[in-house]
Image: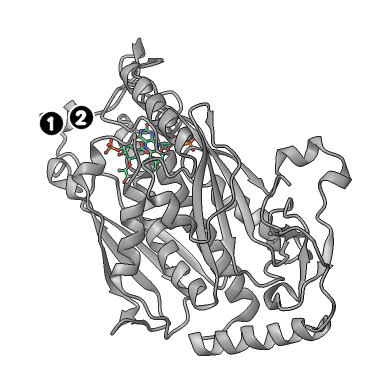
Amino acid sequence: MSALRFTTAGESHGPALVAVLEGMPAGLPLLAEHVDADLARRQQGYGRGRRMQIETDRVEFLGGVRAGETLGGPISMLVRNADWKNWVDVMDPAPRESDPDLRRRALTRVRPGHADLTGVLKYERADARDILERASARETTMRVAVGAVCRRLLAELGVRIGSHVVHLGGIDCEPFELPADLNAASDASPVRVLDSAAEQAMIARIDEAKRAGNTLGGIVEVVATGLPVGLGSHVSWDRKLDGRLGQAMLSIPAVKGVEIGLGFEAARRSGADVHDEIALAPGRERAGNVRRLTNRAGGLEGGMTNGEPLLVRVAMKPIATLMRPLQTIDVKSAAPAAAAAERSDVTAVPAMGVIAEAMAAFVLAQAVLEKFGGDSLAELTRNVDGYLAQVRARLPEDAPDAAGAPAASDPGA
Ligand SMILES: Cc1cc2nc3c(=O)[nH]c(=O)nc-3n(C[C@H](O)[C@H](O)[C@H](O)COP(=O)(O)O)c2cc1C
Ligand SMILES: C=C(O[C@@H]1CC(C(=O)O)=C[C@@H](OP(=O)(O)O)[C@H]1O)C(=O)O
């Protein structure tokens, strides 16, 4: 059993969503506003549909938190769906077979690219609403709530996680220096991009796609700094941190690819242009007083953090619901049909960054708790400090620096 685990429940148009996060130590300072800040960030982004204007996501703690601190038990969180008031009859848990509204809102013209068709076949449902209510990325609200709690734990250890959009709808962001406060910079942009020329082009592309009844995907990059060397392990397949990050990211709706560091580009280069050379670096305690002269590995070697920033890129496909619908079948009549075109997003790539941050925070918090344990935050911190002292003693702090070596932030360097 993992040291830290969570599950979520709730339908997109039901009364509320819930999450239970189990394994957080006691004594972690935690306020609703810590979670609400990330929930609000997830709701931002140019190109989202009307649903995001209806919702104002706010967490309610149902258990596990008292007087602003975690208690060490399961943390139970609830976020209400404001839109539920428009779906009370349709989503009623009691049977209402004769209700005309229920039939009117049935979805039978299954959408290519969504879970609709395979879901109705597999779960023996007549109405794809029974599938989409749970397949909907509304569920990522609770992942972000869970991620916000994990982020609080990681912050206590000096770990920070941010993200930004590097591609949207065919437009690339130019290479840049990452700012010290990545989220302060990316959250200030309507598409969470650091390059203002690309930002304008992306907004124009989203407007164009909307006019055409089309949708767009893109790529986000997650960056985690301050990680101690040695989270994860090389010894077994299911303890490798790159594998665990990959699973977590690919579980997000619409994610179709994950890259660590150079990712696919590494396969195209020779070894001399891929592997990061190593130098002594006095004072870099968390990395064991060493550094990589480049960071093409994206902070992971052998399934373990190496003390450099973690760089994970996530590719999101375009939204499945098109206002100019694709060809499909009606599962009720078995006739050819145009796919259902309900209210929908044109793109959700900016939100994807926030969701991917949350999944990274969960996996990293899990790795931290597996390595260091502790029933209280104080115990965890003592264990981390003891480990860092051990690592620091291996390569002395007063060793000479590798003079003139470049900084290790750009994965493409
Ligand atoms: C934040 C976010 C918002 C999304 N919004 C929509 C949407 O409005 N309409 C839609 O059809 N799909 C939307 N999707 C994508 C679907 O949830 C996803 O494509 C579907 O669940 C099928 O899963 P798959 O793409 O992983 O195969 C969204 C995904 C995310 C992450
Ligand atoms: C509700 C959210 O995203 C939804 C994800 C989604 C889908 O099919 O994945 C479809 C849309 O739902 P609706 O039909 O209610 O507009 C999005 O709005 C959210 O992100 O909170």
Q: Quadrant of ligand 1?
A: top left
The amino acid sitting under disc 1 is Asp
Residue at (56, 43) in percent of width and height: 314
Residue matched to label 2: 105
Dots 2 and 1: beta carbons under 8 Å?
A: yes
Residue matched to label 1: 101
SS under mark 2: loop
The x, y position of residue 49, in whole percent, is 28, 34
Image quarter hosting the N terminus: bottom right
Q: How many marks?
A: 2
Query: Can the viewer see residue 299?
Result: yes
Q: Quadrant of residue 203?
A: top left
Query: Can the viewer see residue 319?
Result: no
Label for residue 44? none
Residue at (67, 69) in percent of width and height: 231
The x, y position of residue 336, in whole percent, is 37, 10
Outermost top residue = 336
The amino acid sitting under disc 2 is Arg
The x, y position of residue 373, in whole percent, is 59, 81
Ligand 2 within 8 Å, label 2 CB: no
Q: Is residue 263 above or below residue 311?
A: above
SS under mark 1: helix
For the residue carrying disc 2, how many other residues have a C-alpha within 10 Å: few (<14), some (14-19), or many (20+)? few
Alpha carbon separation for disc pair 2 and 1: 6 Å
Pick whichever, 96 or 383, lies toward us.
383
The x, y position of residue 173, in whole percent, is 54, 37
